[in-house]
Image: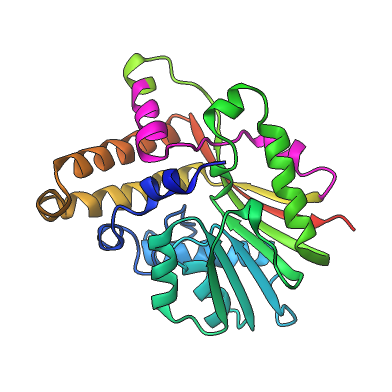
């Protein structure tokens, strides 16, 4: 599992910094470009589909968001889907502060490692959007420990939910390995400089690790949607280049410009992909 210090390297550069290039709701995950090229609209479409995958409806009383980020999904569940009890956990102190400042009705957020989380109630539904990438480290994955770590993650999600619960999950996934030295070095930079302590799972890792706790009901591939999402982010980042360089320094701009370009190439060339999952709790 990524440590709190590693997570804060990834997400605590500055809330203002991320506001410059993410959408207005601060979704730092793949959008769904279904009939639109507008990033704001595409992010809402993403949350709507994940809500369906999580079985969110008028009868849903409570939902947990594992790795809640800056609170975009929490706000969506509270204000759009009218869920009366929304909770999120994060390891980023800057993201926690942002969640609190949003003043989301009927929602709470906690600074907590998911391994230490002990909810006082069982949830009707559970969601997690691109957090599982922090569950296993590159070192643990190379040692073959990642499947057991993912399976424990799904065991805990099962423990925290009621019978009949659904799980709306979104994950970046690893596919092919590039052959050029520069491409490999760019991926190394993203892994160890931007997201230290994290690594993306393979699709088969998720399928295997859900057992015996969750049944895969649907799985959608969104590789090219993520390429388009990151192209939007990179364009916005570059639009603010002078401000970013003067405020946070040349290294921050250069690192993030390189990382976003690497991601565009990774999704274009199928080195990585993005999958949304609808899981059903095995009771």
Q: From the viewer's perspective, is 35 left or right of 167?
A: left
Query: Residue at left 54%, top 57%?
Result: 67
Furthest toward the right, the residue is 283
The x, y position of residue 262, in whole percent, is 34, 33
Q: Is residue 264 left or right of residue 79?
A: left
Q: Is 275 inside the magenta-drawn segment?
A: no
* Colour mapping used in the image: rainbow
Residue 148: quarter of image: top right
Residue extent of the magenta highlight: 185-213
What residue sits 42% from the left and 40% below the top?
195
Q: Quadrant of residue 83?
A: bottom right
Residue 5 coordinates in the image, percent (x, y): 42, 46
Q: Residue at x 39, y 64 (%)?
A: 26
**2 on left or right of 230:** right
Which part of the image, by quadrant, shows the N terminus? top right
Q: Is residue 156 above or below residue 150?
A: below
Q: Position of residue 267 (x, y in %)?
A: 44, 36
Image quadrant holding the C terminus, namely: bottom right
Q: Is residue 27 visible?
A: no
- Residue located at (66% from left, 71% from top): 63
In this view of the protein, which residue sits in the foreground, 225 or 233?
233
x, y percentage for residue 199? Answer: 52, 35
The quarter of the picture where residue 165 lies is bottom right
């Amino acid at each position: 599992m990524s440590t709190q210090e590693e997570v804060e390297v990834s997400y605590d550069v500055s809330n203002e910094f991320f506001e410059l290039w993410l959408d207005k709701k601060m979704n730092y995950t793949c959008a769904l470009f279904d009939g639109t090229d507008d990033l704001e609209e595409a992010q809402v479409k993403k949350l709507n589909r994940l809500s369906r995958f999580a079985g969110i409806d008028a009868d849903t009383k409570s939902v947990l968001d594992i790795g809640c980020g800056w609170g975009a999904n929490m706000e969506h569940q509270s204000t759009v889907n009218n869920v009366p009890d929304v909770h999120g956990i994060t390891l980023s102190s800057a993201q926690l502060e942002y969640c609190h400042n949003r003043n989301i009705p009927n929602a709470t957020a906690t600074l907590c490692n998911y391994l230490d989380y002990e909810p006082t109630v069982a949830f009707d539904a559970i969601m997690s959007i691109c957090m599982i990438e922090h569950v296993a480290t590159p070192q643990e994955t190379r040692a073959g420990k990642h499947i057991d770590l993912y399976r424990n993650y799904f065991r805990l999600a099962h423990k925290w939910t009621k019978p009949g619960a659904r799980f709306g999950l979104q994950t970046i996934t690893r596919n092919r390995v590039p052959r050029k030295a520069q491409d490999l070095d760019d991926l190394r930079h993203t892994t160890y400089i931007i997201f230290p302590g994290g690594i993306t799972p393979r699709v088969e890792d998720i399928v295997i690790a859900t057992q015996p706790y969750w049944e895969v009901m649907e799985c959608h591939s969104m590789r090219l949607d993520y390429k388009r999402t990151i192209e939007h982010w990179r364009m916005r980042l570059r639009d603010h280049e002078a401000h970013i360089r003067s405020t946070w320094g040349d290294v921050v701009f250069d690192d993030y410009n390189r990382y976003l370009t690497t991601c565009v190439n990774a999704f274009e060339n199928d080195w990585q992909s993005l999958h949304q999952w609808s899981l059903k709790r095995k009771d």
